[in-house]
Image (cartoon, rainbow, N blue to C red):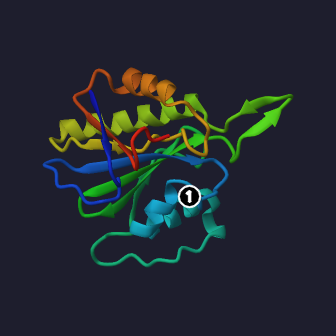
Amino acid sequence: MKISYVIGDITETVKRDKPRCIGHCVNNQGGWGSGFVLSLDKKWPHIGDWYRYWAWGKDFKPFFKEDDTGYGMKEGMTGEFELGQVQWVKADENTTVFNIVGQHRTGIREIAGIRIPPVDYRSLREGFARIKEFYLKSVKQDNAFDLDLVRLGCGLAGGKWSEIEKILDEVFGDTLMDITVYDFEPGGN
């Protein structure tokens, strides 16, 4: 595994020899409307629709229709909507987005002067392990992908990037995966 850091917009098209996957952290409440997902909504609004459909089931009526290109089509998920699970949605011809349920609730709580962020490192580890499983299958099929991330779990979820880097190394350290972390500005979150 190799991690690189770049400044730029993760939703911009990047030409690569391999398929591109974008991973980000979502909450287990079905909430989609602030933080990084706003960038996804601008570029690929159907990704949020599929997340809400996964979270809310029949109570959510998607706003999109699948077209003959296949964009807007949910590719799959690793299980029911709960912490540690991953949903993947085809964003465009070369990009798939992984919705990793790695945040318990929304908002940082304070109890007795102690800040309790909603990021759930165990669930992120489990989600990354599920992505690794997907990656290992893609390697066997000679279709390995790169993984692009924002500093997931560190913005609204209140996590520490140093902890998430450790998890990335633990999970992907024995692979040949290239991971690129995008910041909008130097230093990021």
Side of 77 relative to 14 (left or right): right
Residue nearest the viewer, comparing 27 with 77: 27
Q: Looking at the picture, does residue 51 appear above or below residue 154?
A: below
> Count the marks: how many?
1
Residue at the image position 33 percent from the left and 44 percent from the top: 148
Q: Is residue 105 left or right of residue 9?
A: right
Mark 1 neighbour class, 10 Å CA radius: few under 14, some 14 to 19, many 20 or more: some
Depth check, front residue: 63 or 75: 63
In front of the other: 166 or 56: 166
Residue that carries the numbered disc 1 in the rendered image? 54
Vertical placement of residue 19 versus 151, above or below: below
Location of residue 15 in the rendering, given as x and y in whole percent from the top left corner: 17, 55
Residue 84 is situated, as x and y percent measured from the top left of the image, at 54, 37
**Residue 127 on image: x %, y %:** 48, 37
Q: Secondary structure at mark 1?
A: helix
On the image, which quarter does residue 95 sit in? bottom left
Report whether residue 44 is seen: no
For the N terminus, the quadrant is top left
Percent position of residue 184, x then y: 40, 50
Q: Classify residue 59 by image quadrant.
A: bottom right
Residue at x-position 35% and y-position 55%: 9
| Relative height, residue 129 to residue 83 (above, below) | above
Q: Residue at x 35, y 34 (%)?
A: 133
Residue type at mark 1: give it: Trp
Q: Residue at x 56, y 58 (%)?
A: 54
Q: Please indicate, yes or no, whether residue 91 appears anywhere in the rendered image.
A: yes
Residue most extreme to the right? 112
* Above or below: residue 130 compared with residue 183: above
In the rendered view, does 115 fall on the left or right side of 103?
A: right
